[in-house]
Image: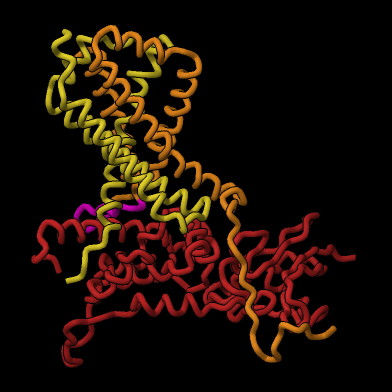
């Protein structure tokens, strides 16, 4: 008799019932199984209608984020707890509208991500003949941490401010903006500033710090936001003191 | 030119106040209020304190500390009310109460430290 | 009952969930955040206490002694102990989080966050000792 693990999975199928519910499942315990394996077992063997997103199974695609016992986690990177008497509760990511079961609508994040222009902006393009932009290891180190973001949106699910104020740009978008602001090849910091240093940008953040706690890639969005607050505050003090000189 | 938003200014004051109060308030509370009340230290005497505050820099510093600490507290508490109780619709009332309170406290500090009544009684 | 009346076939019907007003009670880490934020009330209270002290000082030596004995009344002492405790929490959380907001570099070498925090604690210690010395000895 194999050891069994109990799961309580959030189900929402608006075509049948308008109200969500929790459904109990049992899966065999395997030492090397992650929560995603358990979900796939359910889908293959127990209930094919269970819907959830996943792709790479190795913590890089960022699509399998769910709440596991209330904590935002990648289901591909969270092992099944052994001998747990309490069932594992699996829910869709907080603060996003649910489309079905564990699948949330991520359009809001995608819009915000695009708004902060997370790509290299050049004001003066050099011709190809001049070759590539060179970067020293020190220069790369300045943005490297922020470049690890996989857009899994766990930080949005962890951030109470995003839940309370849906207009807030949110942790990942700001961290990714900083990833480009800190890149020696980028010249777009001034163009990102009006978006970042707005009421719904960094100033909505009260530094709960949960984004950093849940980030599976140790991006530390909370630090990115606080550092940008300092940058924006210094910039604005400068523009108060010397309004014309400020860029 | 883009209008300068108010948030960076408020945040600068919030940070300055947070830093000053973190560095200075615990020791002031301990030396002046807590330790004498518990009998751990003698209460500072009148002549000693007035001579300390007779220096304009000391008074200026105390005013800066009080005003910035109050702005810090007002700013932080405003957000706590927004987030903790979800009363963003009372935005204006909360702003007036918080920042207004900080302003009133600062005016009180200036009044206490820059108008003289103590000296004739010495 | 396969389909209920509010549902249009093949049209998504999103489920939107509200954040509870008491979200900060739901997890220990959220509660710690609110505890940190609520120190603001006690920082303001500390300022009021200091200003009351100055106000008593302004009214003369007798008023100062009366105020100091008022401070040692048990309810007032308890209240100021609570205020002191929360201002300590404010200082500690503030210095612990300071390295997140400031990224200091010496030339090309980033200063480790622990060192930045240690610098703040050191400044706190020096300032506290200096102020204590000035107030207790009269400068």
Asked if the stretch drawn in magenta spans residue C108, the answer is yes
At 41% across and 40% down in the image, what residue appears?
A: C40
- Examine the rendering and report whether any part of residue B22 can be seen: yes
> Hey, which residue is sitting farthest right in the picture?
A1
Quadrant in the picture for residue A240: bottom left
Q: Which residues are magenta?
A: C100-110
Instruction: Provide the letter of the chain coloured yellow.
Output: B
At 53% across and 51% down in the image, what residue appears?
A: B85
Residues B4 and A107: in front is B4
User: Vertically, is A35 above or below B11?
Assistant: below
Left or right, residue A209 beside residue C109: right
Q: How many marks?
A: 0
Left or right, residue B115 beside residue C123: left
> Color of chain A here?
red
Find residue C96 and report its horizontal and vertical position in percent: 39, 43
At 18% across and 20% down in the image, what residue appears?
A: B53
Asked if the stretch drawn in magenta spans residue B99, the answer is no
User: Vertically, is B43 above or below A124?
Assistant: above
User: Vertically, is A87 above or below C62?
Assistant: below
Find residue A188 and report its horizontal and vertical position in percent: 24, 76
Left or right, residue A54 beside residue B92: right
Find residue A246 and report its horizontal and vertical position in percent: 13, 65
- Examine the rendering and report whether any part of residue C139 can be seen: no
Residues C2 and A142: in front is C2
Quadrant in the picture for residue C37: top left
């Amino acid at each position: 008799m194999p050891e069994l693990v109990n799961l309580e999975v959030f189900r929402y199928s608006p075509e049948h019932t308008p109200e969500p519910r929790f459904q109990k499942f049992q899966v065999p315990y395997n030492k090397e199984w992650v929560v995603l394996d358990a979900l796939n077992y359910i889908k293959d063997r127990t209930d094919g209608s269970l819907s959830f997103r996943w792709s790479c199974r190795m913590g890089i695609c960022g699509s399998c984020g769910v709440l596991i016992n209330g904590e935002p986690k990648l289901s591909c990177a969270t092992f099944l707890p052994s001998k747990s008497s309490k069932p594992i509760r699996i829910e869709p990511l907080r603060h996003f509208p649910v489309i079905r079961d564990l699948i949330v609508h991520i359009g809001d994040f995608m819009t915000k991500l695009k708004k902060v222009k997370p790509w290299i902006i050049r004001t003066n393009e050099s011709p190809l003949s001049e070759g590539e932009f060179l970067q020293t290891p020190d220069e790369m180190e300045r943005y490297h941490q922020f470049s690890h973001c996989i857009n899994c949106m766990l930080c949005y699910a962890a951030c109470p401010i995003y839940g309370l104020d849906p207009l807030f740009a949110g942790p990942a978008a700001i961290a990714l903006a900083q990833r480009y602001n800190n890149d020696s090849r980028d010249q777009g910091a001034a163009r990102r500033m009006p978006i970042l240093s707005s009421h719904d940008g960094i100033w909505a953040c009260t530094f709960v710090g949960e984004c950093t706690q849940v980030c599976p890639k140790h991006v530390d969005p909370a630090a990115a936001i606080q550092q940008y607050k300092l940058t924006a505050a210094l910039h604005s003090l400068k523009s108060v003191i010397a309004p014309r000189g400020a860029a | 030119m883009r209008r300068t938003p108010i948030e960076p200014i408020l945040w600068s004051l919030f940070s300055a106040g947070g830093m000053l109060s973190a560095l200075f308030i615990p020791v002031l509370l301990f030396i002046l209020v807590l330790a004498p009340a518990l009998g751990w230290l003698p209460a500072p005497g009148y002549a000693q304190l007035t001579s300390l505050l007779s220096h304009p820099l000391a008074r200026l510093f105390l005013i800066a500390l009080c005003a910035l600490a109050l702005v810090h507290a007002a700013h932080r508490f405003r957000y706590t009310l927004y987030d903790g109780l979800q009363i963003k619709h009372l935005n204006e009332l909360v702003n007036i109460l918080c920042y207004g309170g900080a302003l009133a406290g600062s005016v009180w500090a200036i009044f206490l430290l820059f108008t003289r009544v103590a000296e004739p009684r010495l | 009952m396969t389909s209920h009346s509010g549902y249009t076939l093949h049209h998504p019907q999103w489920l939107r969930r509200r954040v509870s007003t008491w979200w900060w009670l739901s997890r220990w880490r959220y509660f710690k955040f609110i505890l940190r934020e609520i120190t603001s009330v006690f920082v303001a209270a500390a300022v009021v206490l200091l200003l009351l002290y100055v106000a008593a000082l302004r009214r003369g030596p007798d008023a100062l002694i009366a105020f100091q004995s008022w401070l040692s009344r048990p309810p007032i002492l308890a209240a100021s102990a609570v205020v002191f405790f929360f201002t300590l929490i404010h200082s500690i959380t503030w210095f612990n989080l300071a390295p997140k907001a400031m990224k200091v570099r010496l030339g090309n070498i980033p200063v480790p966050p622990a060192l930045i925090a240690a610098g703040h604690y050191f400044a706190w210690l020096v300032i506290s000792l200096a102020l204590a010395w000035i107030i207790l000895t009269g400068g």
